[in-house]
Amino acid sequence: MDHDDDNLPDRDAGIEGYQKIDRYNPQLIESLSGHYHEVLKQIGENPEREGLLKTPERVAKALMYLTHGYDLDAKEILKSAMFKEEYSQMVVVKDIEVYSMCEHHMLPFFGKAHIAYIPNGHVVGLSKIPRIVDVFARRLQVQERLTNEIRDCIQETLNPIGVGVVIECRHLCMSMRGVQKQNSVTTTSAFTGAFLMDKTRTEFLNLISSKLS
């Protein structure tokens, strides 16, 4: 058995809060594997040859992992680490790795997310910001919606003075097919509250553009 076979989620295992139980749903894996077995035949391959014997199962398990965000509650993740704190300056977490799948072609897109918020009586554990990025990224997505979902989750849960989100990604649906533009990067942004003002938004953009010395 592959070393990664035990690290993927069981969709029917039941989730308390945001914690996941990392085991497979055998019925779902079997069903998905059957479909991928047929896909291999339809594209002209032989799913019975040695190199492809376990491919349908592997792809089924990979898909379960790549879309496990459907089972997680991003708001519960934030609520699990909210703390009262009288800090009212900008908090920025930048260069968060993003890996997601385009819902139009089910090809990957990947890049970086930069997120900021201005607390309004509560702060959140810094590790939770990348976690909620993963919750929404591990679903079939478009980058525009991903950006808005992250923004709205933080705004609705923390009720901060404002939220800023910028995401920069490369899309394999552009690089591998269609226009085949390998070096193009898509940037999306979404703001609430104080970040709608030019001064605050400019400060945020300058901070995520700067490098630590």
Image: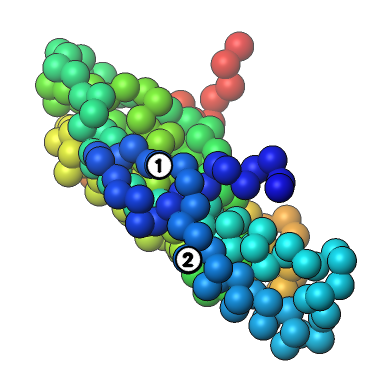
At 83% from the left edge and 80% from the top edge, which residue is drawn? 46
Of helix, strand and loop, which one carries label 1?
A: loop
Amino acid beneath label 1:
Ile
Relative image position of residue 159 (x, y in whole percent)? 14, 36
Q: Which mark is residue 21?
A: 1
The residue most toward the right is 50
At 38% from the left edge and 60% from the top edge, which residue is drawn? 145
Relative image position of residue 101 (x, y in whole percent)? 54, 60
Tell me which label, 1 or 2, sits earlier in the chain.
1
Viewer-closest of 68 and 165: 68
At 17% from the left edge and 14% from the top edge, which residue is drawn? 85
From the image, tell me which residue sits under label 2.
28
Q: Is residue 163 visible?
A: no
User: How crowded is the residue under tag 1: few (<14 C-alpha within 10 Å), some, or many (20+)?
Assistant: some
Q: Is residue 47 visible?
A: yes
Res 178 quadrant in image: bottom right
Image quadrant where one finds the C terminus: top right
Relative image position of residue 105 (x, y in whole percent)? 58, 73
Of helix, strand and loop, which one carries label 2?
A: helix
